[in-house]
Image (cartoon, helix red, strand yellow):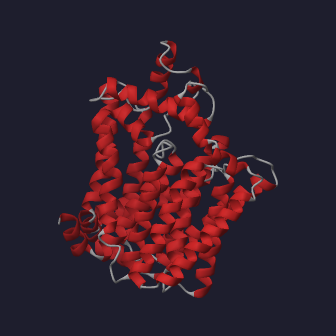
Amino acid sequence: MTGARLTQVFARPGSAWVVSILAALLPLSFSVEWGIKALPSALLFLLGLTLIARAASVRRSYRAAGPVVAVALVAIAFVILNVLLHGLGWRPLDRSAHILLFLVVAACFSLPLRMRVVWIGFSLSAIVLGAAAAIQAHLLDIERPHGLNGGPSAAIELATVLLGLSSMALVQFLAPGTPRRERWLHLVAMGCAMYGALLTQSRGPLLAFAPIFLALVLLHARRDGRWRSSLLLAGAACAIAGAATFSMHGEMVERLQAIAPEVTRFDQRQATRGAVVERLEMWRTAARAFMEHPVAGIGVGQFDVYTRQEIAAGRSHAAIGRYNQPHNEYLEAAATGGVPGLLVLLAVFLVPLRYFSRRVMDPDDEVALPAAIGMGVIGLYMLCALTDAVFYRVMTQSFYFFVVLGLALRIATLRPTDAGRATAD
């Protein structure tokens, strides 16, 4: 079947609906443990391979989104080279394989998808995951809900994905072309996702989301000129979030209030236990690893090995011996990959951020709204990366590259010449 014929087949209503539903299921599939979750990704991967091989229009979309595609390929190549340099075997390549997976899956966004179906599916996923967090907190008495994947240690990852989905729901809620019933669905999804994230008591993602929420609201106001309603929405959201925070039996307030005292005790070497204190000790250890190995790093996935050596030598406290990443993506990249690793990470954030920022004021909502969502997700991850390794777990890494690569290909398909010229300026 020729490429033109192939794209015509998937332009038919039935085929477009099937692909749109599969794409809509992916954020939920990242967040559950059941084996069937691999089915949507596998089907979209096979379709993406076929499209890349046979459809010239899809390959043109990849070229138009060239900078975003290039940084994904560079990230994969860097890990391969780092693994070979340090002789680490092939297990550290698992996360790179997932980047390649979504680089291929992104081809499906070059098809005429039913994007309303995709956005609705994302919001339904937010409702499901938010409800799961509420059930775990209020019915199962789990102190920090972790969702349906990853176990008790996945609370931060669940919060990050929930807040990413909330950003999407916010943009769709604000979009002037969203039908009323769908607008209410996106509003409910936004509320469920934010409440679910609040229940996880994950300070980093919640503090990161606040400026992203405000930025997306102000961006909408600037684009549509509805400053009054946008500011009212921002004020209402802040009031509701504040009320919800203070109604949680004080747990979240106590966690926020504990930040400054723990930092003070760490500076005065009066404490070695506590989430903040342990992070500071891990950051100091990671910084020392970077200073000792600034060119090649200590090797991908080797932070725990280095930490145990530092503990044995008396240079790091034993309290951090149970961690295998320093809870800071920038320091993780610098420590394990040296200067090149840090530069690759910055490119993974900044190149697509620039790509989306140049399209966010486009007069066509089909272009501007995905660009706004892309900027929101990237901004959220960049801020979350200050206090957690956002690409350490497959769930959060998959969500990021699926959204960023997919939306970049979507925009490149709608604006192939313009997108390519904008990124080349």
Q: Quick check: can you spot residue 100?
A: yes
Q: In this view, does 81 lie above or below 362?
A: above
* Residue 381 rendering spot, x and y as whole percentages: 46, 53
Question: Which of 374 and 233 lies nearest the eye of the viewer?
Answer: 233
338 displayed left or right of 216 = left
- Image quarter where the C terminus lies is bottom left
Q: In this view, does 42 lie above or below 122?
A: above
- The residue at the point 65 percent across, 64 percent down is 241
* Residue 409 rendering spot, x and y as whole percentages: 34, 66
- The residue at the point 47 percent across, 12 percent down is 313
38 displayed left or right of 255 = left
- The residue at the point 44 percent across, 79 percent down is 221
- The residue at the point 29 percent across, 51 percent down is 71
Question: Which of 195 and 404 lies nearest the eye of the viewer?
Answer: 195
* Residue 26 rendering spot, x and y as whole percentages: 53, 60
Q: Quick check: can you spot residue 89?
A: no
